[in-house]
Amino acid sequence: MKREQVVGRVREAQSHLKRRRATGAAISQMLEDDSDLDRPDVEMRRGDHDLNESGMRPEPPLVPAAVLVPLVSHQDGFTVLLTQRAADLRAHAGQISFPGGRIDPEDKSPEDAALREANEEIGMPHHAAEIIGRLDTYEVRTGFAVTPVVGLIEPGFDMVYEPGEVADVFEVPLSFVLDPANHERHSRIIRGKRRYFYVLPYEDRYIWGATAGMLVNLYEVLTGDKARWR
């Protein structure tokens, strides 16, 4: 895809997100109900529950977090930059992820948090990213509500991994993500129940779970098509 197409489609999606949040807030205020799970905007959030039966959503309150979805601009097209988490982390060790983490009190917005985390994890300077919008909030089974922030990245900065968090950094062609033939649905038995999730297997990388779900959301935004199994 060309740069103007990517920017236009992500920015177009922002109006839908704003309408959802406004509608949800208005109805919650009218009903005087502060329960997140009763709000329409929350009901339409993405998450580990997307491909599963009811009862798979994490219990509120959820911890606010943000990730950067970095689209790296190369002469021959865009790639998506991903990290592989360190093998000795307590949570999600060795998994493929976007740069990101919890939103700290000093972060002014999810965008600030995503850029801060990208700088801490892979040494990406803030000025290397042009933020063009967000994807849908993604609820993770471990209790986080993640805001994916989409940024256009200019290559050429020096990668400096945070050794305690990042084992590797690699790029996947955006064209691979936008091909629905590369979207697979796998399952595992977790706590006695079968759980379904998206997988995008790329070369020797196993991209699954929340990261795969956000990539499928990116596919829907950029193509206008609905993903399989949703």
Image (cartoon, rainbow, N blue to C red):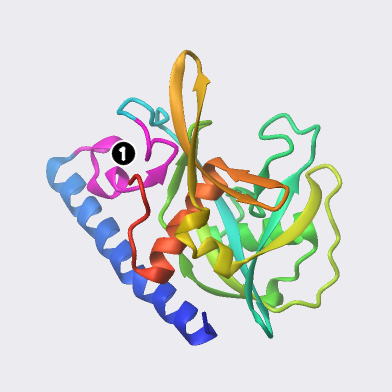
Query: Does residue 174 appear to the left or right of 164 in the view shown?
Result: left
Vertical arrangement, residue 89 with respect to residue 99, above or below: above
Query: Does residue 204 appear to the left or right of 229 in the view shown?
Result: right
Q: Is residue 22 magenta?
A: no
Which residue is rendered at x = 49% and y = 65% of the image?
178
| Residue 99 in sight here | yes
Residue 43 x %, y %: 28, 43
Query: Does residue 54 appear to the left or right of 121 in the view shown?
Result: left
Q: Quadrant for residue 67, please give it.
A: bottom right
Vertical arrangement, residue 102 with respect to residue 70, above or below: above
Q: Which residues are magenta?
A: 33-52
Which residue is rendered at x = 61% and y = 59% of the image?
114
Q: Which residue is mark 1?
A: 36
Q: Nearer the viewer, residue 62 or 31?
A: 62
Which residue is rendered at x = 42% and y = 30% of the image?
58
What element does badge 1 sit on?
helix
Vertical arrangement, residue 217 with respect to residue 8, above or below: above
